[in-house]
Image: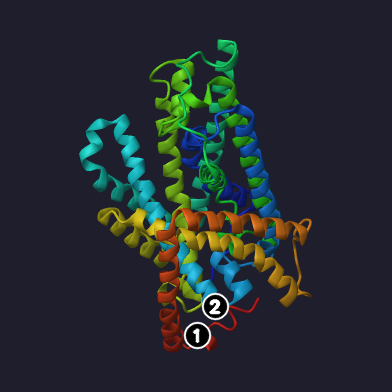
Amino acid sequence: MAADTLQRLLGKSFSIAACVGLVIGLGILRTPGEIATTISEPLPYMALWIACGLFVMLSLLVVAELIAMTPRSGGIYAMVAHAYGPYPGFLIGWTDWVASCASIALKAVVLLEYFSLLVPSMAPYQTVAAVAVTSGFAFLQLGGVQLGAGIQRIASTGIGLIMIVLAAALFYGFFKNGGVADVVPPVARAGTPGMAAYGLVVAAVVFTYDGWYAASYFSEEIKAGGRGVAIGSLQAALIVFVLYVLLNLAIVLSVPLTALVGHDLALAGALDLVFGSGAGTVIIVAAVFILLAHQNLQYMIASRILYALSADGLGAPRAATVNDRGTPAVAVICTWLVTSALIIAGQFEFLLNLVAILFMAMYVGLIVGVFRLRHSEASAERPFRAWGFPATGVICGLGWSAVAVFVAVTNPMSALSGVLLTLVSVPVYLWLKRRRHLGKQTAPTMSW
């Protein structure tokens, strides 16, 4: 039997599992090699990871106030709509949903590419297998929110254990070899890296920490309420920070960073250097596991975005229904259809590049949204108050603005695409507003 609202069925532990599960992805497996191209000295390398991690933690300490004040599922869409109103919410909500579908499609394809390295006979069937895998996870969601949440708790625990085991293995290699592995001489760098190169590595590390807002996609369903979601997000961010610092420390102690340059999976290269050729295969297995876990979580996330949009009259009306197991089933099916089409058409990377600049604007918007609500909803209840505000808000706002400007300058086509996408969205929004009498239909829903 279909319902109109999501059910409060999830514990605070799920908010931690969601954040850990979304943040830890392939980025940490490959980013060290990309960074080593520019920063190959251990101390600056570690300082970069620690500084960026602390910056993300500080950002979350600010945005946690907005998360706690927005007790609706839908994540970034719900928070932006709360802080700025229906149209900005519409723009970022649809951007987030399309990007989520593209990300699911990309990860399904990459998953099969890695799996084909383990089982070469699968190579000719990668596209068909990618559709089959993503379809399996989509229909798994129809079994209910408790099933998806249970899988995610197990998956996130497994991902955390993978990080710990990898770090322990590299620390063991360090003690076994009596220091840094004796490998080929460091790769010579042509010239001194410029500001653009340093900006690129900062952006890469910041994006490797991305996903700290994941629990907000389920705010309406977590029993502990808005404060519980905010606290769970902070706890998860701290867990990830510790895991990332521990793993990177193990890397710099066990291998020369320059030896990782050029590795698609830098951690695989590190294991090969420490334990011998072939040891890095375990990283491919880890990558497959992480990508499988992301299929589950991102279907849960994407369906909540479409559900929230539809509940506010900005999507398909039937996508705003919930089955008797607490899952927005129609929203899941819509997400699956779009994801499968993207896998077959191979257009996911184009879409991810298209929306990249809007996501940078979104991060700035979340910080500014806290300032905005401090003014417009000064007397509203705040289950969690931003730490060190307004000074922390200014620091984080400037920091994210700098990252956004860097992305726009280094990827002008993405910036232009973002502007064009915004322009196209205006008449679409006005058409929806006129057709569905948005102002009257969503007033109760959009009342914060």
Q: Are marks 2 and 1 in contact (CB under 8 Å)?
A: yes
Discs 2/1, front = 2
Mark linked to residue 438: 1
Position of 431 relative to 294 (above/below): below
Q: Which residue is mark 2?
A: 86
Classify mark 2: residues with Cα within 10 Å, few (<14), some (14-19) or many (20+).
Answer: many
Q: Earlier in the sequence, mark 2 or mark 1?
A: 2
In the picture, the quarter occupied by the C terminus is bottom right
Q: How is the image coloured?
A: rainbow
Circle 2: element type: helix
Residue at screen point 39% across, 26% down: 281
Residue at screen point 63% across, 44% down: 52
Residue type highlighted by circle 2: Pro
Quadrant of residue 153 in the image? Answer: top right
Q: Nearer the viewer, residue 261 or 157?
A: 261
Q: What's the distance in space between the residues labelled 2 and 1, CA to CA?
A: 9 Å
Residue type highlighted by circle 1: Leu
Classify mark 1: residues with Cα within 10 Å, few (<14), some (14-19) or many (20+).
Answer: some
Circle 1: element type: helix
